[in-house]
Structure formats: C-alpha cells, structure tokens
Amino acid sequence: MALPVLRLHRQDQVAVALQPLAKGMRGEVVGVGELEVSEPIPRGHKLAVVDVTAGEMVRKYGEVIGVATSDIGRGSWVHSHNLQNPARTSDIPEQITPSERPDEGSHSALEPPTFRGYVRDDGTVGTRNYIVVIPSVHCAVTVACEIAERFSQEELAEWPHVDGVVALGHHGGCGLPRGGLQWKMLARLLQGMMRHPNVAAALVVGLGCEQLAVDDVVPLELPGGAKRRRVETLVIQEAGGTRAAVERGEAVIRSWLPELNGWRREVVPARHLVVATECGGSDAFSGVTANPAVGRAIDRLVACGGTGVLSETPEVAGAEQVLLRRAATPEVARALLERLSWWEWYAGVFGAQLDQNPSPGNKAGGLTTIAEKSLGAILKGGSTPLRAVVPYGAEIPRGGLVFMDTPGFDPPSVTGMVAGGANLVLFTTGRGSCFGAAAVPTLKVATTSELARAMPEDIDIDAGGVLEGEPIDAVGEAIFRRMLEVAGGEATASESLGYGRHEFVPWAIGPVL
C-alpha cells in the first residue's frame, strides 16, 4: 500500500504529506521503498524519506530549501525545529540557458485564442471600462471617495458599459521630499493608473498645498496616449472646500457618462493580455497545485504573444538560481541580483532579514523556509525565459515573462503590477486570502478542494484536483480559458464581493517628514 505522500523530485530527501500521518503508519514511497512514519506529521508538512545528517542541504522540487540543523531520521517530521534557510547565492550562473519560448504546439490546430476587450487609441486593450478618481495626496482621499460613492451600481444602471467609478485612496503625497524616490514612485504609480487600458477617464483631486500636486500627476503630455481618455483635475482649496469639491467632481463625471458608455468590446487576440501573478496565504500545496497550474496558463499566454508578470522580490530569495538560469541575457540576471541585494540591505536597515518570511500562516500550512516558499512561488511564472526586470510600478514591456520589483505583501505588490499595465490578475491562495484589485479583475485559484469548498464565494478556480491525479496541464488550460472569459467581461468572485475599493496600496519608501 502506498503511503499518502508526494515526492516532487527524485533528488528530494522529503515528501509532502497529503493527509495527516500518524506515528507508525507504513507504506511504499515511489523511488524510496517502504517507509514507517516515526512521529505525527500534519497534512501539507514534510516527511524525511531518507536519513539526513546535521549540516546537510535538504532538497524539495529538486532544489535546496534549507540546511538540517540536527540529524533527521528517515520517517521524521521536517520543519522549523530541524531546518533553517540556506545561504543565498550572489553569483550569475556561468551558463545562462533560458528555456525556449513556448509555441502553440498541440494547440496549433485550434482557433487562435481571443477575448472581447476595449481597444484604446494607443493600441492597448482594456478588460474593463472604469472611471477612476485619483487623489494626489492623502488629504484629498475623503473627497475622492465621496465623489466615487455618488456612483453606486444602481446609479450606473443607466450606463451599462461603464463598469464603475472607483477612488484610488492612498496615504502619500505629502510629508515627503519633493522629487525624491518616494515622490517619484507615487507619481509614476498614479500616472500609470491614468493611462491604464481599463481606465476610460480619470479625475485627479488635490488639496492645493501638497508636495505631489495635481499638475505633477497630470503633466502636459502624459506618456502612453492620454488623448484616448478623459482626464481632468480638481483642487479642493480652489473649489471652495470639501462640499463644493464633491459637487463639482460629481458634475464632471456625470458629464462624461454618455460618452464613456459609448465604448464597446471588440474581439482581439489573447496577446493583448498582461497578466499579473500573485500568491497570498500560501501553503505547502501552493507549489504543488495552484502555482504550477498558473505557470502552465502563463506559458500558454506567452505562446500567444501575451505577457506574464512575476513579482514579490523578497519571496524570490532562495529561488533566484532558477530564475537566473532562465534569464534571457546576463543583463537581466544582473538586474535581478541587484534587486535582491538591495532588499537585503533595505530589510537590514529596519533590523529585519528576508528569511523572517514565511508568515505564521505559511508555517502552519507546512512551509518552513523562505527558500521553500520562493521555489513554490516562482512556479507561477511557468517555464519561459525571463525577458526583463522592471522597477516598481513601471510600464511593463509587452511579450514574454517580466519580473517587477515589488514587496511580498499582496496589496502593494499587485498595485505596482496593475499600475504597470496588468489588465488581469491571477491570485493563488492556500490559506484563503481575500483580495481584489481596483479596476482590474482578479481570478482567485485555490490550492486545495477543501479551501474551495470552505470559501466558495471567494474562489474562482479549484486546483485541488491535482492532488487527486488531475493533470497539471489540464488545470492550466482551464485557468487559461477562464482568463479569456473574465477578460471578456465575466465577473470574478472578488468583483462580485466588491473588492478593489480599499486594495490600492502604493509601496512607500523613505522618511515621513
């Protein structure tokens, strides 16, 4: 009888428990033979399938996830009490051999995949048709939110081709050095939302005395084709105060509605999709089911000429060697290493270390080290070459796999990718994260069927069938097809629940003055 565990690679000294293992359980493990469990092991946690000596490198996915801190007997539980994070690499591989760009292969006989999107004048394509109200400073957030709240779904029923009016509240815009790093990052982020393909019009609201003013957010010529959209500014101090500014902002948006409702979806190739990938509330099955399935969907998208985006730089630590081997050029590899080195310095400034991740929830789910978490996380990027590494919130180059430098925390990470032009988000979760992005549909993928059943209103796709033998490729294809449906207008679970109003969270670096 087989022991209910999964060994992911023939070099692995550990296997993942597919159900709770009791002391004394016996069974066969592929490639190992018969094994007896020597102590209770929770579901999703690691079982040693061979004897491991103290100081030995321990592998999962065929890659090093940690160093044994004590001798570990065959059949024992492997976790924080006997495994610690390995040292991080700082070298570019001598031989960079990026995998070949996938092509349609077995899909070549099928019709080229398409979706119905909003074609903008600059050639980008929106998956939604939104109006955004953008405060240039936190002092203007209340006014911006009040303006947006005047346009409920009931209020917009007369304008069925306008998906909504959403305020992008944030905590920045003043108390920071003008022209400094934080100032530039926030300006870039807000400008990215103005030119986003899902945004048909933007109203930028300022107070009137802040460091990041409306004229900084809306330059005379906005890169990326601002002529295709409505953009206006509103300054509270010039409008006559709060109430007057709200009334004026409401009037401006009402005057736009007839024109913006004239946008219609058109059939376009799947290459116009720019898909951000994110994992939140990860567990030990994230790297077994949902993340590799999303990776297959990203490979499929790239084969069509589309764009996939990886992020969360602190959660690449320990797995960077895999991405370095896939770097399209040495310059791309150096850019990734530079970002990781910066993050080590940045965390150290605040007395932190990158290996202080995983979170308590991750550890309860079976993840022990940041290397183990990272190796599972990067599977969302599929197998294609890494074409570029871009700064936080920067415009995402089209075509292939791109890495954006972001924090690991989900809201600011997704905010950066959306501001860079992502028009759809794939979000995997093992513990049950609740999230949805402002103005962009977010597809939630559960790592287990138990989670999908426990939170049915929050989950779009159940990847748990992989644990029951469903092929990863089949789940990846189902995700890809669902991406096209959602890009064409079908609502996601997070959209139905109203997420996105509070999830625009710019990453802030630097002093508050």
Image: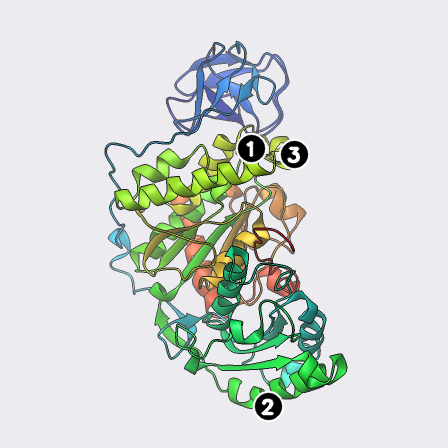
Mark with earlier residue (1, 3) = 1
Which sits in the foreground, 26 or 304? 304
Q: Which residue is mark 2?
A: 255
Q: Disc 1 vs disc 3: Cβ atoms closer than 8 Å?
A: no
3D distance between C-alphas at marks 1 and 3: 15 Å
In this view of the protein, can residue 383 be seen by the observer? no
Mark with earlier residue (1, 2) = 2
Disc 1 element:
loop
Q: Which of the two discs, 1 and 2, sits closer to the camera?
A: 1
Q: Residues within 10 Å of mark 1 (few under 14, many from 20)?
A: some
Q: Residues within 10 Å of mark 2 (few under 14, many from 20)?
A: few
3D distance between C-alphas at marks 2 and 3: 50 Å
Which sits in the foreground, 96 or 292? 96
In percent of width and height, residue 217 lies at 52, 72
Q: Which residue is mark 1?
A: 353
Q: Which residue is mark 3?
A: 360
Disc 3 element:
helix
Query: What is the residue that sits farthest to the right in this orientation?
Result: 243
Which sits in the foreground, 505 or 258? 505
Going 64% across and 52% down the picture, which residue do you hit? Answer: 434
